[in-house]
Image: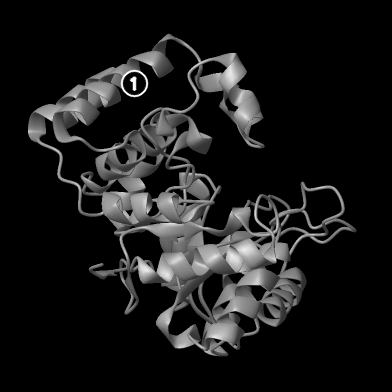
Amino acid sequence: MRKIKFGQSDLEISPISFGGNVFGWTLDEKKSFEILDAMTESGINFIDTADTYSTWVPGNQGGESEIIIGKWLKHRRNRKDMVIATKLGGDMGNGKKGLSPHYVEEAVEASLRRLGTDYIDLYQTHYDDPDTPVADTMEALDRLVKAGKVRYIGASNLTAERIEASNQYAEDNNLAPYISLQPLYNLYDREKLEKEYLPLIEKSSLAVMPYYALASGFLSGKYRAEEDLKKSQRGGGMSKYLNERGWAILKAMDEVSAEINAPLAQIAIAWQLHKSYITAPIASATSDAQVKNLAAAAFLKLSTDQMDKLDKASAIS
């Protein structure tokens, strides 16, 4: 798989980012290793995770995904070949959350320990912390960059205004800026990125790696009715897509699929990659076949007419 430049950095990444939320959740350690091996064999070198993956699983404390990735990196001895992105700021329990300087230092050390590495390629603020001034957070993150613990920083669920204020402070004080954005974006969920973030993305030349690229699996086409949701542990998150707009999107995808003989999951990711402002969509897989499907999406070509059809079916008001 070809490598592309990650925004304003010296990182070379695959145009697909593998979502690490499945490690320690739907996949145990053994199966996670198998999927990670399949991922690298398919040419994907970019893994996105977070310290909170997977606190929502009964019995988990958070950090399970990072621990599995760390063990795999150690066993495969391939740290230098991989680009690892993780996040901080989400609720880890016992008051461990936020973006205060003290917690930034605590959180990065915990992630480094779990990942078994001495540096993180891309360290992202997962959620905003309105109680901490952007100045405090950006200065704390800059110290991590200067110490070599973090190469670059990015933002996920912060507002465009908050990211812009953070980067303005960084510019004014010669600090490391956010170079990337990780927003919700897919054929169904278009509004926030296109209406709120796009001007900032273009102004600041942010790399964009959207999460839920497959809308929790809905855009794979496997879930078209309520009874289908029982097929997956993630089914609960897809019920919101079962409506007229969702079915219209699937219909358009079905038509494109028939024209080019490609599965819907590939079409959903290829649609994003045909957008000039998208760098590397994030998607997960739980089988070798799904991994190959994701990797193949990077090479799928959609015609102007096919893009128009998908754009119209998923148009926002």
In the drawing, does residue 172 fall left or right of residue 66?
left
Residue 307: horizontal and vertical position, in percent?
Answer: 17, 32
Q: Is mark 1 on a helix, strand or loop?
A: helix
Instruction: Locate the N terminus by quadrant.
Output: bottom left
- Report whether residue 316 is seen: no
Circle 1 residue: 249
Q: Nearer the viewer, residue 91 or 82?
A: 82
Where 16 sits versus 6, above or below? above
Residue at image point 56% right, 81% down: 73
Instruction: Locate the C terminus by quadrant.
Output: top left
- Report whether residue 12 is seen: yes
Residue at image point 44% right, 39% down: 214
Amino acid bearing label 1: Ile
Residue at image point 49% right, 42% down: 212
Where 153 sits versus 81, above or below? above
Residue 179: horizontal and vertical position, in percent?
Answer: 40, 65
Q: Which residue lies furthest to the right in this view?
A: 94
Where 27 sits versus 317, above or below? below
In the drawing, does residue 24 fall left or right of residue 159?
right
